Amino acid sequence: MKRCFLVLTALVVLFFGQYPGFCATTQVDALIEKLVEKNVITRDEARKLKTEIVEDEKIRIQDEVKQALPGWVKNMEWKGDLRLRNEYIDKDPGRGNDRQRIRLRYGFKSKVNDKVSFSAGLASGNDNAATSTNQTLEQEFDKKAIWIDYAFVNYDPTAWLNLKGGRFPNPFFTTDMVWDSDINFDGGVIALKHALNSAESKTPLEGYFTSAFLPIDNRSTSARDLWLLGLQGGVNAKFADFASLKSGLAFYNFHSLEGYPTATLAQDKGTNSASGGNIKYDFNIVNPTLELELNNPFGLGIPLTFIGDFAENNGAPAKNQAWRAGIAIGKKVKGIGDWRLLGQYSRIAADALFDAFPDSDFDGGGTNAKGWEVLFDYGLAKNVVFSLDYYNTEPIVGSKVTEQVVQTDLVFKF
């Protein structure tokens, strides 16, 4: 898009403000034709020379346009993706639901100065739910809505300190057992990182600490607003060319959630314990997460990754734990022929997590669920990924109705 903008601007400048350059090019063409007539150069040499002159002129115009643009425009970096999905959900044998969905995301990052940048993006979605940017194709070809997905300022005063404010991507190291991968957070973040040993070490270690204040719900009729304080510390390590480790220990304190009216929580799934229409327990969650990647354990150039996630809500007396164990074979898909196979099992008790935020595809979202997920990604071409995702889940307590979900995706990144 940036290139198209520059070319369009260049054309406008050329035809409406750069007639002298145009005339000069025309005179050069006439001179070349004279050289051909006098047999100084051949027709093929003349054609090649004209092509080189045109290309040089294009570069000159583009450079002039770039110099004339404001700094914040020249520094803009655009990115986005479009996902086409067919989703089949079978919760009642013989009466499955097959639907087609799209997801569009597009945004930019602009460098304000050497330490400050601004990012913003838009995304599709059936509604304003935090856990989904999917748009179902339905309702007689109605136009589809676009939402503000993120908008934040990023400040790096030093190499070891980062500050964010606004609406931003997940600042924590986590899996989607706790936070659905589509969630962007409102509020502010202070993030610290520092090397724990020498950069020349065979096992470089980096420590980090992240703190975030995240407002969740504002009640104009009460002083009891709902907000979240998130804290996480951890260590990342690389063991030569053999392995790498990511670790995090997080604490999430949901202020005022105990006794909060469920009717005022638009994204509440109803799987947490409630009493008299209010959330029954507080949520003070301890959440350790580990990811160990072995770079080449079989000597075939295929990495192997182990994933572990655990959460315990100290605010509830029972049904207060969630855990996940998974293994992935292959590398992150970036180019043609890349592939990755992930298998993981999760068990999320009813009051282990606030039910508005876990993976919305796992047993329909919420808590009180257990089951498997198998995900396969394959690179069809550069920036084009085929994905097949399968869920087999059921409630932990209550009616043992198995839900099976099959999602077939084509993702185009640009």
Image (spheres, rainbow, N blue to C red):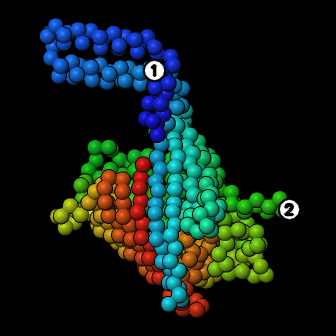
As drawn, is 362 to the left or to the right of 382? right
Q: Nearer the viewer, mark 2 or mark 1?
A: 1
Amino acid at circle 2: Thr
Q: Secondary structure at mark 1?
A: helix
Image height of 179 relative to 193, above or below: below
Viewer can see residue 390: yes
Amino acid at circle 1: Leu
Q: Position of residue 235 (x, y in %)?
A: 42, 56
As drawn, is 39 to the left or to the right of 241? left
Nearest the viewer among 211 and 384 is 384
Residue at coordinates 55% horizontally, 64% vertically from top-left? 134
Q: Secondary structure at mark 2?
A: loop
Viewer can see residue 326: no
> According to the image, label 1 marks what residue?
14
Q: Residues within 10 Å of mark 1 (few under 14, many from 20)?
A: some
First-in-chain label (2 vs 1): 1
> According to the image, label 2 marks what residue?
221
Q: Residues within 10 Å of mark 2 (few under 14, many from 20)?
A: few
Nearest the viewer among 45 and 239 is 45
Q: Position of residue 27 (x, y in %)?
A: 33, 9
As drawn, is 330 to the left or to the right of 392? left
Residue at coordinates 60% horizontally, 91% vertically from top-left? 398
As drawn, is 55 to the left or to the right of 219? left
Q: Position of residue 389 (x, y in %)?
A: 41, 72
Cα gap from disc 2 to disc 1, whole angstroms: 61 Å
Image height of 61 relative to 92, above or below: above
Residue at coordinates 64% horizontally, 80% vertically from top-left? 271
